[in-house]
Image (tube, helix red, strand yellow):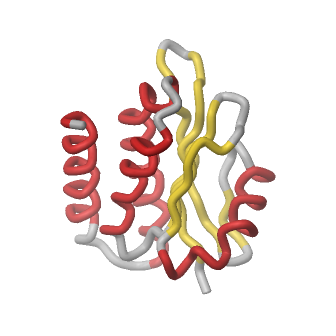
Amino acid sequence: MKAYLSISLAGVALLFASGCQSGRDYSGDEAMTVAHVIASESGSAVAFGDHQGIEHILSSIDQSEYLNFGIVLDGEKHIVASYFKPDASSQKEVVMAKVLQSLPEGLQSHGLSFAVAPIGSGGQVTGYVIIGATNP
């Protein structure tokens, strides 16, 4: 639990610090940064199937004004955990389908943009973190 608290605090600090810039273009940079941070911190949770721990880590995107969803996949691209802000939860199924079709590159069109970061070490990919935004 202590590890998750430090991870969450690091994520929150990163998101608050990143709020210095504004604009739609910045959301892509923020998504990539947050995806990489979460990927580096969630490897063991993915390996051990700790869904609750992963959801807790993903919930740190609540602190961002630009980002509104996060998805973690295992190495076989199956959904391990996801988190959607309340204003994006109605689009959850559509977003998840588009994300799975667009892996591993990412997407920025049709009101959806997201960044993908691999989870793993030593060159072995054990999963993916997807962080993004739905745009009205």
Give the left or right position of residue 125, taking residue 77 as reference: left
Instruction: From the viewer's side, name the closer residue of 96 and 15.
Output: 96
Question: On the rendered image, what quadrant is the N terminus found in?
Answer: top left
Looking at the image, residue 8 lies above or below residue 22: above
Query: Which residue ends up furthest to the right in the rendered image?
Result: 101
The x, y position of residue 113, in whole percent, is 61, 66
The x, y position of residue 49, in whole percent, is 52, 31
The x, y position of residue 8, in whole percent, is 26, 49
Picture quadrant of residue 7: top left
Picture quadrant of residue 54: top left
Give the left or right position of residue 17, taking residue 108 as reference: left
Give the left or right position of residue 37, taking residue 135 as reference: left
Question: On the rendered image, what quadrant is the C terminus found in?
Answer: bottom right
Q: Which residue is at a point 37% across and 42% down the rendered structure image?
A: 37
Q: Which residue is at a point 70% across and 59% down the rendered structure image?
A: 96
Instruction: From the viewer's side, name the closer residue of 110 and 61.
Output: 61
Query: Which residue ends up furthest to the top in the rendered image?
Result: 122
